[in-house]
Amino acid sequence: MNNEIPKEYMRFNVTERIQHVFMLVTFLLLTFSGWALKYPEIEHSKGLISIFGGPRNAGIVHRIAGIGMLLDFAWHCAYLAYALATGKMKLRMDTTIIPLPKDVVDAVKNILYFLGLSKTRPEFGRFSYIHKFDYWAVFWGMGIIGLSGLFLAFPVQSSYVFPMWSVNWIWEVISIMHSDEALLAIVFILFWHFYNEHLRWDKFPMSMTWITGKITIEQMKHEHPLEYKLEFGDKKGVDK
């Protein structure tokens, strides 16, 4: 049995990385096409529209990318269900993506640490409260943006779902829900996800984990000490 600790740890497998790439590509397509269609009067929107070959083509790209993102989301949910059903994924306190009371405590401890009111940082498992908030925000976004987007993409079919007394206002509500929640998602991804995963001083200009799936053991010790102890606590060379 090899008790040596490897130099790198596989954090995400190939399937998970492919799902993330699909999410990234469809998100970028939706962002640029949606922004151009929402604000056509802005000068740079005209350039974006021309790249897509006109507003009609931009709308087609937007719809295709939206359906692609929903399919990717459905694939991810099915993947999780299969992994849990077959025992390939196990629910553990130090590795679960499910929010726990500890995450609230960790958030408070981290804020106190950054403010200089505490000398110790909280110890995170496989996912910190930042990762969990980042992850579950996608489910919230898919519920609002995805569902409203389907209604807007297929208005004739969707009209059968709504009662007659709502036809004078329901489409305006759906349009506002879709565009405003999408704008919130763009801002969230740029200022929360990109910063925490790529633009922080210790990861700038980009973390390669989303491509390789790996992190160094030193990085694992620093960012995920509880998972490190769980995976390598009984192996040679572990810090006691």
Image: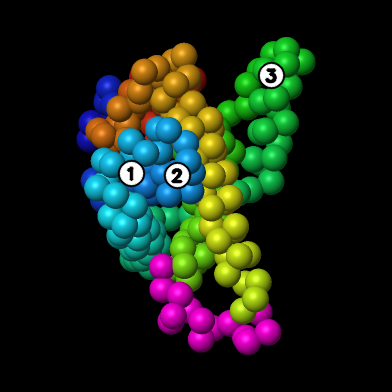
Whether the magenta-drawn stretch holds residue 211 is answered as no
User: Image point 54% across, 57% down: which residue?
Assistant: 178
Name the foreground residue: 157 vs 68.
157
Left or right, residue 128 beside residue 67:
right
- The residue that mark 2 highlights is 40
Disc 1 and disc 2 in contact, CB within 8 angstroms: yes
Q: Position of residue 3 (x, y in %)?
A: 28, 29
Name which residue type carries label 3. Tyr
Q: Earlier in the sequence, mark 1 or mark 2?
A: 2
Name the foreground residue: 190 vs 151.
151
Disc 3 and disc 1 in contact, CB within 8 angstroms: no
Between tags 2 and 3, which lies in front?
2
Cα distance between the residues tagged 2 and 3 = 45 Å
Between tags 3 and 1, which lies in front?
1
Question: Which of the 4 quarters of the picture holds residue 85?
Answer: bottom left
Name which residue type carries label 2. Pro
| Quarter of the image that includes the N terminus | top left
Left or right, residue 29 beside residue 173:
left
- The residue that mark 1 highlights is 49
For the residue carrying disc 2, how many other residues have a C-alpha within 10 Å: few (<14), some (14-19), or many (20+)? some
SS class, disc 1: helix
- Residue bounds of the magenta highlight: 153-166
Q: Earlier in the sequence, mark 3 or mark 1?
A: 1
> In the rendered image of this protein, does residue 82 appear above or below residue 97?
below
Q: Earlier in the sequence, mark 2 or mark 3?
A: 2
For the residue carrying disc 3, how many other residues have a C-alpha within 10 Å: few (<14), some (14-19), or many (20+)? some
- The residue that mark 3 highlights is 113
Colour theme: rainbow
Whether the magenta-drawn stretch holds residue 156 is answered as yes
